[in-house]
Image (cartoon, rainbow, N blue to C red):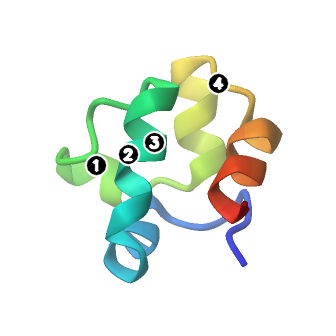
Amino acid sequence: MIEKTTKIGDLLEQSPEKADILLEAGMHCLGCPASQAETLEEACAVHGIDVDELVAKLNA
């Protein structure tokens, strides 16, 4: 189960196919070393994305 506190690096390591969902949401910095240690909640705050909506899409 993916949560707000899931780190982007962990998510992409376990489910690389989810990268498309993150890119569609506007997170185009997935290769940035800093993004790997960010939680979904932190990244969504920076990019102005609704974290609850994104988590729901990732878990669908």
* Identity, as a three-letter code, of the amino acid under mark 4: Ile
Foreground: disc 3 or disc 1? 3
Residue for badge 3: 22
In this picture, residue 5 sits left or right of residue 17: right
Q: Is residue 28 above or below residue 43?
A: above
Q: Is residue 5 left or right of residue 10?
A: right
- Point out residue 37 in the picture as x, y percentages from the top left corner: 39, 61
Q: Position of residue 19 (x, y in %)?
A: 36, 52
Q: Is residue 18 left or right of residue 54?
A: left
| Between discs 1 and 2, the one toward the N terminus | 2
Which of pointers 3 and 4 lies earlier in the amino acid sequence?
3
**Residue drawn at point x = 45 percent, y = 42 percent:** 22
Q: Residue type at mark 2?
A: Asp
- In which image quadrant can residue 17 be found? bottom left
Secondary structure of the residue carrying tag 4 is loop
Q: Is residue 37 visible?
A: no
Foreground mark, 1 or 2, reads 2
The residue wearing badge 2 is 20
Mark linked to residue 34: 1
Q: Which residue is mark 4?
A: 49
Residue found at the far top of this picture: 48
Q: Residue at x 71, y 64 (%)?
A: 59
Instruction: Describe the element under mark 2 as helix, strand or loop.
Output: helix
Quarter of the picture holding the N terminus: bottom right
| Crowd around label 2: few <14 · some 14–19 · many ≥20 (10 Å) | few
**Badge 1: how crowded within 10 Å, few (<14), some, or many (20+)?**
few
Picture layout, residue 36 above or below residue 40: below
> Residue type at mark 1?
Ala
Amino acid carrying label 3: it is Leu
Q: Is residue 17 left or right of residue 50?
A: left
Give the alpha-carbon distance from disc 3 to disc 2, as whole Å: 5 Å
Q: Residues within 10 Å of mark 4 (few under 14, many from 20)?
A: some
